[in-house]
Image (spheres, grey):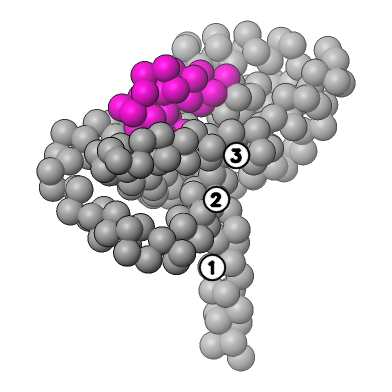
């Protein structure tokens, strides 16, 4: 572990177990989809409906979603293929003080580098910045203060996990934006669908953005459950 991680983590961890109410509040924020994804979700829909006559705004929204999904997927793949990095709460010898209400075995066995939360929400913030710098600044603040810092405080991520995830998210948006002439071809069918069959597009768009807001947690749980059931059936 590097000196930067040690210093930042140590600073936040000194406040753990000083107040049950504070620890519980930060743990609630860290684990709340309503305070994370469902604060970003209205901003995406705002950007979509900000000016219905500006097709470029809607292209930007769809490109942002594409970049956010790509960044989150890459972060998850990197967690699986890079050398395992235990989360602070599970790191032996770190002498980490567990905040009140934080389960000791939470996410045990899941590598922490890079943060898929940071990759997703910083990608969304970068895309929103392209639509409105003011709204984008709010989204960056939300990604840093509401999404990321609580995860450091409760011991789910080292600071470099967050920074690498944030860099991944912003880079994904920058790459897609730089080559938007190519990537826009991927979202043109969705734009056409929104105009031709809006009564089908918007329910699908709502489901997609809702799943994106909490990192496809329900979808991943469903796929994992079906895979487990299929595996058991084949074994038997």
Is residue 132 one of those drawn in magenta? yes
- Rendered view: 36 above or below 108: above
Label 1 Cα neighbours within 10 Å, binned few <14 / some 14-19 / many ≥20: few
Residue 184 placed where, x, y %?
A: 20, 48
Magenta residue span: 121-145
**Does label 2 or label 3 sit earlier along the sequence?**
3
**Does label 1 or label 3 sit earlier along the sequence?**
3
Label 3 belongs to which residue?
38
Is residue 71 one of those drawn in magenta? no
Residue 24 placed where, x, y %?
A: 81, 27
Label 1 belongs to which residue?
223
Label 2 belongs to which residue?
210
- Rendered view: 32 above or below 219: above
Quarter of the figure with residue 103? top right
Q: How many marks?
A: 3
The rendered magenta stretch, by its main secondary structure, is classed as helix
Label 2 Cα neighbours within 10 Å, binned few <14 / some 14-19 / many ≥20: some
């Amino acid at each position: 572990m590097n000196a930067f991680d040690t210093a930042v983590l140590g600073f936040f961890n000194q406040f753990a177990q000083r107040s049950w109410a504070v620890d519980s509040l930060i743990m609630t924020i860290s684990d709340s989809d309503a305070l994370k994804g469902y604060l970003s979700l209205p901003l995406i829909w705002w950007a979509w409906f900000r000016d219905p006559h500006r097709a470029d705004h809607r292209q930007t929204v769809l490109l942002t979603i594409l970049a956010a999904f790509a960044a989150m997927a890459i972060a998850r793949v990197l967690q699986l293929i890079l050398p395992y990095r235990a989360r602070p709460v599970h790191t032996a010898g770190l002498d980490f003080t567990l905040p009140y209400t934080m389960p000791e075995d939470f996410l045990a066995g899941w590598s922490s580098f890079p943060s898929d939360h940071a990759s997703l929400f910083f990608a969304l913030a970068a895309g929103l910045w392209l639509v409105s710098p003011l709204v984008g600044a709010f989204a960056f603040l939300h990604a840093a203060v509401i999404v990321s810092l609580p995860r450091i405080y409760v011991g789910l991520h080292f600071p470099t996990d967050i920074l690498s995830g944030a860099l991944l998210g912003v880079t994904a948006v920058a790459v897609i934006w730089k080559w938007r002439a190519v990537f826009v071809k991927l979202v043109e069918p969705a734009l056409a669908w929104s105009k031709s069959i809006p009564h089908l597009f918007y329910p699908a768009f709502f489901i997609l953005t809702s799943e994106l807001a909490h990192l496809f947690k329900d979808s991943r749980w469903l796929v994992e459950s079906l895979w487990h059931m299929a595996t058991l059936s084949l074994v038997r």
